[in-house]
Image: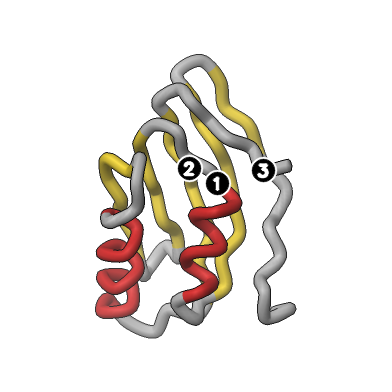
């Protein structure tokens, strides 16, 4: 069962496979079009995506990045009242 977060939250996703700032922009644009996402910031140098919003489903966000051809795993989830490290979400490509 997927973790569904109803409170305002921030999800941090590790992203591998980006080769330039254009890759980061592509991911950011896709995430910003996702329901519940208020803001998405993707950093190519850090290899991280930080997504804020409500009703975020961390595994679905990672899967969306994987569908773009990158390898994503959820690094952490911060809600209004807590922070938790989440287990890595394996990519669909098996990498």
60 or 9: nearer the viewer: 60
Residue 17's spot in the image, x, y percent?
50, 80
Which residue is labeled 1 in the image? 58
Q: Do the CB atoms of the residues marked 1 and 2 lie less than 8 Å apart?
A: yes
Residue at image location 29% in from the left, 73% down from the top: 26
**Within 10 angstroms of label 2, few (less than 14), some, or many (20 or more) residues?**
many
Residue at image location 54% in from the left, 54% down from the top: 60
Q: Which of marks 3 and 2 is nearer the N terminus?
A: 3
Name the residue furthest top: 81
6 vs 49: above or below: above
Which residue is labeled 2 in the image? 11
**Within 10 angstroms of label 3, few (less than 14), some, or many (20 or more) residues?**
few
Which residue is labeled 3 in the image? 2
SS category of the residue bearing label 1 = helix
In 3D space, how far apart are the residues under numbered discs 1 and 2 (Cα atoms)? 6 Å
Residue at image location 61% in from the left, 59% down from the top: 73
**In the picture, which quadrant includes the C terminus?**
bottom right
In 3D space, how far apart are the residues under numbered discs 3 and 2 (Cα atoms)? 14 Å
Left or right: where 40 falls relative to 62: left
Number of the front mark, 3 or 1 = 3
Residue 45's spot in the image, x, y percent?
37, 68
Q: Do the CB atoms of the residues marked 3 and 1 lie less than 8 Å apart?
A: yes
Q: Earlier in the sequence, mark 3 or mark 1?
A: 3
SS category of the residue bearing label 3 = loop
Number of the front mark, 3 or 2 = 3
The quarter of the displayed image where residue 44 is located: bottom left
């Amino acid at each position: 069962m997927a973790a569904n977060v109803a409170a305002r939250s921030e999800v941090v996703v590790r992203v591998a496979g980006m080769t330039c700032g254009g890759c980061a922009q592509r991911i950011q644009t896709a995430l910003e079009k996702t329901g519940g996402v208020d803001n998405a910031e993707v950093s190519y140098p850090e290899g991280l995506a930080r997504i804020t919003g409500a009703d975020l489903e961390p595994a679905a966000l990672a899967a969306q990045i994987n569908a773009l051809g990158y390898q994503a795993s959820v690094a952490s989830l911060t809600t209004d009242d807590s922070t938790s490290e989440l287990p890595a979400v394996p990519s669909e490509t098996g990498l």
